[in-house]
Amino acid sequence: MPDPMENETHVLDRPPEGASADWTIPQNWDAYTPQEHATWDTLFARQARLLPGRASAAYLKGLEALRLSDGGIPNFEELSERLAKLTGWRVVAVPGLVPDDVFFDHMANRRFVAGNFIRRPDQLDYIQEPDVFHDVFGHVPMLADPVFADYLEAYGRGGMRALELGALKQLGRLYWYTVEFGLVEEAEGLRIYGSGIVSSSAESVFALESDSPNRIRFDMKRVMRTDYRIDDFQQNYFVIPSFEELLRQTVETDFAPLYEEILAQPDIPIATILPGDDVITRGTQAYAESKAKG
């Protein structure tokens, strides 16, 4: 797919000059331009209007507790102080996407890596690589929730084992369909908590209100076999019953035999409904089909 950043890239094969061995760099908050702060403010204001009644209670509580606002790009040191008091997590700046082992090590030690760059004003609706708005606005409020904070730490530890067992793709699907694009059942109905949704104005609406995607109750084996798309709205969303249940399954599962089982099975294509699925919404897939037709 075409790179929306044209000749720019934040995908690196080694730590850049000035970075630590763990790929962390100074956020260099004073270097942000007024335009970059204004871009954050524009994105924040748009999402702040959309998310009440759509985002999970845990996300909205975290957004308020961490005092994220439309006052410009947050200072990671100040944000980390507030976050550490709640769950022990901190936010550390990195120059872009980092290697898997580095990513998992930071996560297992309650350090959330966040890009220190922000998208251009002409990229408000889509950026391929995660920027500071996706990483901080999308992810960090959920880290203020003690249960979800424990889940991500457990995921980081599991990531190191998945690398050893050759199951990184399978574990990555769990991250994609929970941390990035997850839905949760609450008393008031389905709510979004995945960062890829809460940081996107269009997908915040699409994920809950469109009749196009499938919404399927969460099953770990099923999720870890299911392909996903990176270039447009999801065609499947998986719905957890609670964050407590997500954490319970993660810490109680013996992943070695699970990987052995699913690695011997075929991948499940995007948008497929299986006979054993607990389907909340059987989507029409009209959106994806219309895009495929051009």
Image (tube, rainbow, N blue to C red):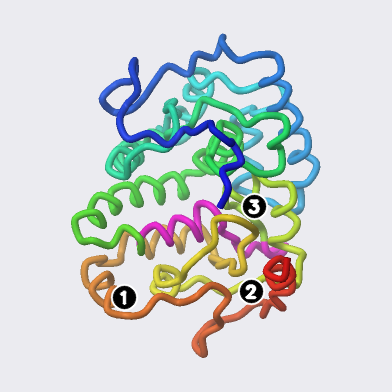
Say which residue appears at 61% left-offset and 34% top-offset.
133
Question: Does residue 291 appear to the left or right of 12 in the view shown?
Answer: right
| Disc number lying in front (1 or 3) | 1
Q: Single out the residue that lies furthest toward the left.
A: 164
From the viewer's perspective, is residue 77 above or below residue 220? above
Say which residue appears at 49% left-offset and 75% top-offset.
269
Q: Which residue is mark 2?
A: 214
> What are the residue bounds of the magenta stretch?
171-190
Q: Position of residue 225 (x, y in %)?
A: 40, 72
Instruction: Find the distance from the CA under tag 3 to the CA under tag 2.
Output: 19 Å
Q: Single out the residue that lies furthest toward the top.
A: 30
Amino acid at circle 2:
Asn
Say if mark 2 contacts mark 1, CB within 8 Å.
Answer: no
Please tell me the numbered disc located at residue 262.
1
Question: Does residue 183 appear to the left or right of 151 in the view shown?
Answer: right
Say which residue appears at 69% left-offset and 77% top-offset.
283
From the viewer's perspective, is residue 27 above or below residue 153? above
Residue 97, quarter of picture? top left
Amino acid at circle 3:
Ser
| Disc number lying in front (3 or 2) | 2
In front of the other: 286 or 191: 286
Instruction: Find the distance from the CA under tag 2 to the CA under tag 1.
Output: 22 Å
Question: Does residue 33 appear to the left or right of 142 in the view shown?
Answer: right
Say if mark 1 contacts mark 3, CB within 8 Å.
Answer: no
Secondary structure under tag 1 reads: helix
Q: Earlier in the sequence, mark 1 or mark 3?
A: 3
Q: Earlier in the sequence, mark 3 or mark 2?
A: 3
Please tell me the numbered disc located at residue 56.
3
Question: Does residue 75 appear to the left or right of 161 in the view shown?
Answer: right
Please tell me the numbered disc located at residue 244.
none
